[in-house]
Image: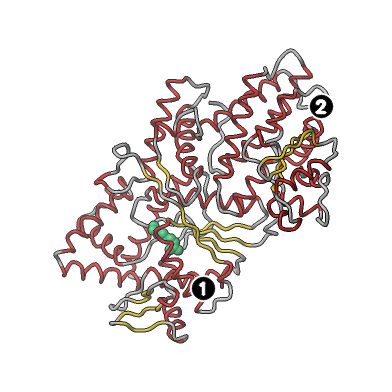
């Protein structure tokens, strides 16, 4: 069932197919503007009349029992639907298809690789990584829902002289116990210490470089330490991913792809793309307004860009994917434009299927959560602060949950994730703990709370032996504003997919929650009136299922009790 299609059959426009009318119909931003609206601006050119006059004549010719009212406003024909008729259509359609509601087989099982989160070994993941992590995961879930076969890639930052430094530092002043005890914190401190010392100590710096060369050549002892550090870093990151239910399929990062650098550089030279400039090897992209991309340092050491070019080529050879999406912070956007341009100059035939997506940045109101030494906030610290705040709010409000320590995490972290995904991706957002972890307003907890409310109604109904059966004759009129929202779920997820913008789902979920809560405050859902209770139970069941899906696409947990 498609409301726009049904309505398009009722509007007759000379020389126009129903399917074209359907494409024009849109859901107006405000209720007062009707349930569907037909903008007449594009028709003005065809009929040589003003949009308003066209809307007026369409209104005059409208004679349909399923449209109860039409109004003309600023070139739009606003349509109000026959509530009884559409309630039945919508509820039946939603009930019958709830499992895969709104899903379409767009992907046709094609392989889509999404690279996101991409943390660095021996460093704590910070708030920048969190944005990419939640956007990337949301994209994965959406692509899967629309029929793609998705692989989740975490391209580890695990290559470079800094690992020579960490290992040298460990050998000089580290201890096994301390690393076991403090994990990545210890590795990071070791790095900071030796890095400062290297600034005034050329000999030490050379020792670190030497150490890294040995690692590359496969020195057993050094390789063992490196693998251990890598394992510790991944373990720590997995604790964060566990809170978000994220599982990566492929963890190969820079060090894996570095092995193909020689080949990559050779290709660049053979194709006449790379030129020597003051000792360094670079690709000149100034004709594309993209400056110069260095691919080999004067010292002969390889760099970040080379490894990305190598992975670009090798990932395709290995996966033969249909689509590859990179998700990173906006500060790498220009860099990816450069890498992709080099890919096109290399004539890689799959460059039209490679995309880069930039996330906005999230900032914290000053003074609230700063991490050690004034550096960027770490995900771990943010999670903890959010959890503590959620704990305080829950204790104050009182909770029905039997396990507050689980719930406070779900709510605190969920609030954080919601703050990131609710604003249009490229915009920067502020994470204000007090605002984000509140049960009022456009917040994650409000969404989770409404979901939990529907769960408790369903549970109670089950105890009372009520079934979600609906009687359209007695369905109260005031339910229509909720019912009408059900099919908008389809637009929300489809737009989120095609525009890479989960904020469509966040906004949709907020509307659905507020309509449901309005109904909840107006009518007693489970009462002595069995027919009425079962009617409202049906709508609660569907709201519950849709909210659960929204939470899933927004990478949030769905607590059943709060
Ligand atoms: N590890 C990098 C960082 O933390 C992000 C990697 C992005 N992906 C890539 N293919 N370069 O900044």
Q: Position of residue 205 (x, y in %)?
A: 20, 67
Q: Position of residue 16 (x, y in %)?
A: 81, 55
* Residue at the spot of label 1: 313
Is residue 505 visible in the rendered image? The answer is yes
Task: Determine crowd level at label 1: few under 14, some 14-19, many 20+ residues with C-alpha closer than 10 A.
Answer: some
* Residue at the spot of label 2: 472
Q: Which of the two residues, 65 or 214, is positioned nearer the viewer here?
A: 65
2 and 1 marks in contact (CB < 8 Å): no
Q: Quadrant of residue 122?
A: bottom left
Quadrant containing ligand 1 reads: bottom left
Task: Determine crowd level at label 2: few under 14, some 14-19, many 20+ residues with C-alpha closer than 10 A.
Answer: few
**Does the closest atom of ligand 1 sit within 8 Å of the Cβ of label 1?**
no
Q: Is residue 368 above or below residue 147?
A: above
Q: Position of residue 445 (x, y in %)?
A: 50, 32
Tell which tag, 2 or 1, sits nearer the viewer. Answer: 2
Q: Which of the two residues, 164 or 515, is positioned nearer the viewer here?
A: 515
Drawn side of residue 194 relative to residue 489, left or right: left
Residue at 43% in and 77% down: 287
Which mark is first along the chain, 1 or 2?
1
């Amino acid at each position: 069932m498609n409301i726009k299609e049904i309505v398009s059959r009722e509007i007759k426009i000379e020389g126009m197919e129903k399917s074209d009318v359907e494409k024009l119909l849109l859901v107006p931003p405000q209720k007062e503007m009707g349930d569907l609206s037909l903008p007449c601006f594009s028709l003005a050119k065809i009929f040589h009349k003003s949009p308003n006059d066209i809307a007026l004549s369409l209104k005059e010719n409208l004679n349909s029992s399923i449209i109860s009212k039409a109004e003309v406003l600023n070139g739009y024909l606003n349509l109000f639907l026959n509530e009884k008729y559409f309630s039945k259509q919508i509820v039946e359609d939603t009930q019958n298809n709830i499992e895969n509601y709104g899903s379409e087989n767009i992907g046709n099982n094609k392989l889509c690789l999404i690279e996101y989160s991409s943390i660095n070994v021996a460093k704590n993941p910070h708030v920048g990584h969190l944005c990419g992590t939640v956007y990337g995961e949301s994209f994965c879930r959406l692509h899967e829902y629309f029929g793609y076969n998705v692989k989740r890639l975490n391209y580890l930052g695990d290559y470079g002289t800094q690992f020579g430094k960490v290992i040298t530092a460990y050998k000089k002043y580290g201890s096994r116990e301390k690393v076991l005890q403090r994990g990545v914190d210890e590795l990071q401190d070791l790095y900071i210490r030796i890095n400062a010392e290297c600034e005034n100590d050329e000999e030490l710096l050379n020792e670190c470089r030497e150490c890294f060369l040995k690692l590359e050549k496969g020195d057993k002892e050094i390789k063992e330490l490196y693998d251990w550090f890598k394992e510790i870093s991944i373990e720590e990151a997995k604790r964060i991913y566990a809170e978000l239910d994220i599982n990566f399929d492929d963890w190969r990062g820079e060090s894996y792809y570095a092995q193909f650098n020689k080949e990559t550089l050779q290709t660049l030279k053979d194709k006449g793309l790379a030129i020597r400039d003051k000792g360094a090897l670079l690709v000149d992209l100034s004709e594309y307004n993209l400056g110069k991309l260095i691919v080999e340092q004067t010292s002969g050491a390889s760099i970040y860009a080379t490894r990305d070019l190598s992975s670009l080529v090798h990932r395709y050879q290995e996966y033969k994917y249909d689509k590859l999406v990179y998700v990173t912070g906006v500060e790498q956007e220009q860099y990816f434009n450069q890498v992709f341009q080099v890919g096109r100059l290399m004539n890689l035939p799959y460059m039209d299927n490679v995309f880069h997506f930039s996330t906005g940045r999230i900032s914290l109101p000053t003074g609230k959560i700063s991490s050690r030494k004034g550096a960027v906030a770490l995900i771990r610290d943010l999670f903890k602060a959010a959890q503590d705040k959620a704990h305080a709010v829950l204790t104050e409000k009182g909770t029905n949950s039997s396990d507050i320590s689980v719930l406070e995490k779900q709510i605190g972290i969920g609030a954080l994730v919601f703050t990131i995904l609710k604003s249009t991706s490229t915009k920067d957002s502020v994470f204000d703990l007090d605002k984000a972890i509140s049960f009022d307003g456009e917040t994650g907890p409000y969404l989770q709370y409404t979901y939990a409310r529907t769960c408790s109604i369903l549970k109670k109904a089950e105890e009372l032996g009520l079934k979600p059966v609906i009687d359209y004759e007695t369905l109260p009129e005031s339910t229509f504003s909720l019912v009408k929202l059900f099919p908008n779920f389809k637009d929300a997820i489809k737009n989120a997919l095609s525009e890479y913008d989960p904020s469509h789902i966040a906004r949709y979920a907020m509307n659905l929650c507020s309509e449901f809560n309005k109904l909840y405050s107006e009518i007693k859902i489970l009462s002595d009136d069995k027919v009425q209770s079962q009617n409202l139970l049906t709508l609660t069941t569907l709201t519950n299922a849709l909210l659960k899906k929204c939470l899933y696409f927004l990478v949030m947990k769905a607590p059943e009790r709060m």
